[in-house]
Amino acid sequence: MNITFLGTAAAEGIPFPFCDCLTCNHAREHRGRNIRKRQSILINRDALIDPGPDLYASCAQLGMSLTELRHVLVTHNHPDHFQPVNLQFRAKGFRQQTDLPLLTLIAPPSVLATWDRFGSNDASAEISRVPFLPGDSLSVPPYRVEAIEATHIEEAMNYIIDDGRSKLLYACDTGLYRDRVWNALEAHRLDAVIMECTLGSRMSARTHMSVGHMKTMLDRMRLLGCIDDRTQLFATHFSHQQVEPHEPLSRMLLEEAGVQCAYDGMVLTLGEEHSA
Ligand SMILES: Nc1ccn([C@@H]2O[C@H](COP(=O)(O)O)[C@@H](O)[C@H]2O)c(=O)n1
């Protein structure tokens, strides 16, 4: 499974244009991995999680097209994770010479309601919708997708994605899992975990993760046998209000939690990593 981080920031991005905090100012001055677009990942070339506000800019910057995209999974109904216009522009009039595969839109009912409220049309966007909720699973070859309940807003989900060779847990956005979620997770042996660490080392909250909470979650996963020393661990979805620039943040995550710090353009081939 190839995974490309299209964006690694929380709602505001880094730098947030309406902010002059140290992290935002440092990003403007030093750029590189300090610049973070809003959170989104591409799996291989055919599955995308969270088509947020920076999707087109990320693809342009990384030289990637989405013409092979077949599955879009949405975690929850927040505007930094789902922007209907990204998929509305799949309509024929916007790409007359390009044929696209039918797209499966896997999303909670609240996200599908937003899709409808923005005047979207499934037929013209060549989309087949699949209402999805925590506890649901389905097969969209080559993937098996299972949703577990996130601790964030109503209907928010994290995804377990299995391509038959490796299994990923995508844990954005969430706070500490509720007890009932651990029963569902127990059955899984994970090759990679991508977990939000919105709050860095500065604070704790119910609906987002700090490095302390991340360690708590990973310790419990280890105890249950979901992860072991071979599992690759990544932190992402950082808030400019809570984290330092990329280098000190990377050091802190590695030292305190044994976790790698994701950056925009990072590519994982489960077992390897190199820049796009
Ligand atoms: N405990 C928190 C929660 C949020 N933030 C900041 O707010 C932004 C939006 O949060 P959502 O819960 O709506 O995703 C987030 O990007 C953080 O910058 C926070 O600092 N502490």
Image (cartoon, rainbow, N blue to C red):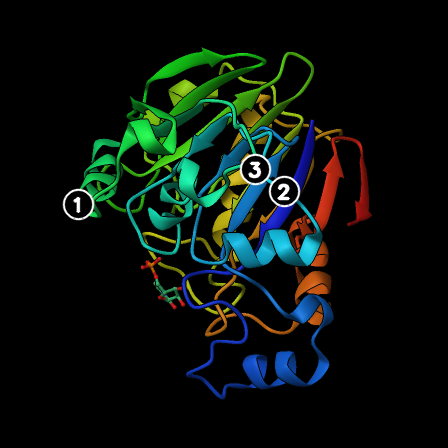
Q: Which residue is mark 1?
A: 117
Q: Residue 205 at x, y = what percent?
A: 35, 58
Query: Mark 2 or 3 closer to N-term?
Result: 2
Give whichever of discs 1 and 3 has the lower sequence position.
1
Ligand 1 placement by image quarter: bottom left
| Above or below, comparing residue 139 to residue 97 in the picture | above
- Give the residue drawn at x 19%, y 38%: 113
- Name the amino acid, label 2: Ser
Could you tell me which secondary element the residue under label 2 belongs to? loop
Q: Mark 3 falls on what kind of element?
A: helix
Amino acid residing under circle 1: Arg
Q: Which residue is mark 2?
A: 65
Q: Nearer the viewer, residue 82 or 118?
A: 118
Say which quarter of the image contains residue 117. top left
- 171 to 32, vertically: above or below: above
Q: Quadrant of the N terminus?
A: top right
Q: Is 208 on the left-hand or right-hand side of 163?
A: left
Residue occupying image coordinates x 64% and y 73%: 245
Give the x, y percent position of residue 217. 50, 40
Counting from the top left corner in percent of width and height, residue 216 is at 50, 44
Q: Position of residue 239 (x, y in %)?
A: 48, 66
Residue 83 visible here: no
Which mark, residue 219? 3
Q: How many marks?
A: 3
Q: Earlier in the sequence, mark 1 or mark 2?
A: 2
Using the image, determine if residue 256 lies above or below residue 188: below
Q: Is mark 1 within 8 Å of ligand 1?
A: no
Q: Nearer the viewer, mark 1 or mark 3?
A: 1
The residue at the point 45 percent across, 53 percent down is 209
Q: Residues within 10 Å of mark 1 (few under 14, many from 20)?
A: few
